[in-house]
Image (spheres, rainbow, N blue to C red):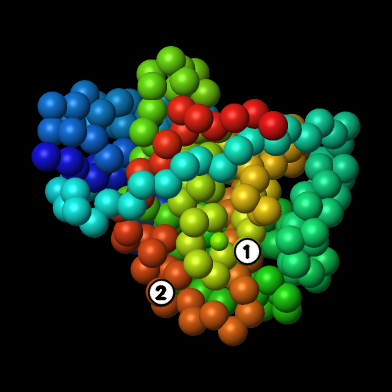
């Protein structure tokens, strides 16, 4: 039997009552791994760079094996820049090559720099106009029901990247999503990425150290209905084969 297990943690109360988001993570695992993974997720909520959570929500439900979608991870390409400005310019160049307008890119960068302190989900923007398409305000669209099919050797010590790669691969497999921009809200984690062109473009400097600002923006093809996109991102179970994640 397979289970989806999801953790979200906040400080100063629950997310619903205005607490600050501290950490979120999830897995899809077999029943014999469930209690070990539950304990790992709780440990993460208690030892996080953003502080110790005082609210932890753990949700577990079964996954219908027949409905799981299997995909390959995006290949990884690494970009080395000397400053955050250069990082953002590199991200914009890559996204523009995929048909996302400079207007939409700039809007996304400004939003991540300013608006997302307490968001645990992603913002959806029209890839051409840059207009916001989701109506979730500070909550955002939380991509869920996914995991990597992994070998433990691959995963050791690189959780940020492999979790992001798993999420980006699911997002990229969604019909109507043209690209993604992301950097972490973890104060000490400055590496970010853009996903477009079926590639995970990893950029070494996307924010200044100690900034708590970060998050995700998904660029949506114009005139696509957003409800099916949101439903796929939030609810469809997707397993991503990251063992083949070749470094370009
Ligand atoms: C997050 O914390 O959710 C974002 C992590 C971005 C990871 C980027 C990378 O290391 O490739
Ligand atoms: Mg985080
Ligand atoms: Mg797509
Ligand atoms: Mg569910």
Q: Is residue 243 visible?
A: yes
> In what quadrant of the picture does the C terminus appear?
top right
Task: Name the secondary structure under disc 2.
Answer: helix
Is 21 situated above or below 221?
Answer: above
Q: Residue furthest bottom?
A: 223
Task: Name the secondary structure under disc 1.
Answer: strand
Q: Quadrant of residue 104?
A: bottom right
Measuring from the top left, give residue 39's x and y in whole percent. Answer: 24, 26
Residue 98 versus residue 80: which sits nearer the camera?
98
Measuring from the top left, give residue 184's x and y in whole percent. Answer: 60, 42
Label 1 C-beta lies within 8 Å of the nearest ligand 3 atom: yes
Q: Is residue 161 left or right of residue 87?
A: left
Residue 211 versus residue 216: which sits nearer the camera?
216
Residue 147 versus residue 117: which sits nearer the camera?
147
Is 179 situated above or below 145?
Answer: below
How crowded is the residue under tag 2: few (<14 C-alpha within 10 Å), some, or many (20+)? few
Q: Which residue corresponds to mark 2?
A: 228
Q: Which residue corresponds to mark 1?
A: 178
Label 2 C-beta lies within 8 Å of the nearest ligand 3 atom: no
């Amino acid at each position: 039997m397979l289970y989806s297990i999801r953790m979200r943690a906040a400080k100063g109360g629950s997310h619903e009552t205005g607490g600050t988001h501290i950490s979120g993570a999830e897995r899809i695992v077999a029943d014999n791994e469930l209690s070990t993974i539950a304990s790992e997720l709780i440990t993460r909520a208690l030892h996080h760079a953003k502080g110790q959570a005082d609210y932890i929500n753990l949700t577990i439900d079964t996954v219908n094996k027949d409905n799981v979608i299997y995909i390959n991870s995006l290949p990884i390409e690494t970009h080395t820049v000397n400053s955050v400005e250069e990082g953002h310019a590199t991200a914009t160049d890559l996204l523009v090559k995929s048909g996302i307008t400079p207007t939409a890119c700039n809007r996304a960068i400004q939003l991540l720099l300013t608006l997302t302190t307490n968001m645990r989900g992603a913002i959806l923007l029209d890839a051409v106009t840059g207009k916001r398409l989701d109506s979730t305000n500070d909550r955002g669209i939380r991509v869920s029901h996914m995991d990597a099919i992994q070998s433990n050797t691959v995963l050791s010590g690189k959780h940020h990247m492999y979790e992001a790669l798993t999420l980006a691969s699911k997002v990229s497999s969604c019909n109507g999503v043209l690209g993604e921009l992301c950097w972490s809200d973890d104060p000490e984690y400055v590496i970010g990425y853009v996903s477009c062109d079926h590639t995970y473009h990893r950029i070494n400097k996307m924010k200044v150290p100690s900034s708590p600002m970060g998050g995700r923006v998904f660029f949506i093809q114009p005139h696509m209905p957003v409800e099916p996109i949101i439903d796929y991102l939030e609810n469809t179970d997707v397993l991503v084969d990251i063992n083949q994640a070749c470094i370009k």
